[in-house]
Image (cartoon, rainbow, N blue to C red):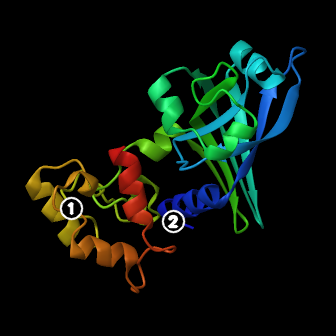
Amino acid sequence: MELHNALKRVGDIINKTSEAAVAVLDEEGYPHVSQRSLIHPTTIGEVYFSSDRGGNLHRRIAANGRTGLTFPHDRHNVTFSGITEEITDKVIKRARWLDWFERHFPGGPEGEEFTLFRFTTERISLWLEGEPFHLNREDIFTVDSFCGLYCSRCSFREKFNCPGCLNSGGNPFWGSCPVGTCAGKRGIAHCGCCPDGPCGKLTEYSCGEGEHSDNPKGARLEVLNLWKG
């Protein structure tokens, strides 16, 4: 499975998942796992969840923010590793407040007991349809093409001595790419930065029925959103 398609599947999984297993180190250095409801929308780059102020999870994250999140889903497994920090900004806390939180935090989004956490992804380990992926943040967020493909992972690049989409100005080993050459002429970093995008040609590549179209559809568009964000 190509990486852009794999990341689209990951995005779909975490946005359909209501809870994640949160792993932190306890006071004796052992991993401790608890379930936490997710505050949607979530992204591959960051995830929000909440907890009681002064509780075990709050105390342990304050002592060591290194955290693991696991999102089990059918035959797949998605695990993020990264850093969790408490968010004290009142605007962000109000924006991430959910109505049902009132049962647990009667003081509302500005009450002392409501603790909001933001998890920032540093590494991802995936098991999707029997295929493993192990990625660092740099692997995911480094712009690698104009259209959203992960060009550096292309199996044909070394075989055909291809300089890649960006280095070739949209002219890889197989010929001139209309999407890539358009982006090159416009002088934009990638198609996600285009003020007129996504254009019909890019949408056709990403969401069409062709042999090389994305599966699931829209994978390249989602990668472009990651790079743009």
Q: Amino acid at mark 2?
A: Asn
Residue hosting label 2: 5
Q: Residues within 10 Å of mark 1 (few under 14, many from 20)?
A: many
Q: Is residue 58 left or right of residue 164?
A: right
Residue 177 versus residue 98 in the image, above or below:
below
Residue lying at 66% horizontally and 26% vertically, measured from the top left: 107
Residue lying at 47% horizontally and 64% vertically, measured from the top left: 155
Residue 154 versus residue 48 in the image, above or below:
below
The C terminus sits in image quarter = top left
Residue lying at 17% horizontally and 49% vertically, measured from the top left: 188
Residue hosting label 1: 170
Q: Is residue 172 left or right of residue 134?
A: left
Q: Position of residue 112 (x, y in %)?
A: 66, 18
Marks 2 and 1 sit apart, C-alpha to C-alpha, by: 21 Å
Residue lying at 51% horizontally and 33% vertically, measured from the top left: 94
Q: Amino acid at mark 1?
A: Gly
Secondary structure of the residue carrying tag 2 is: helix
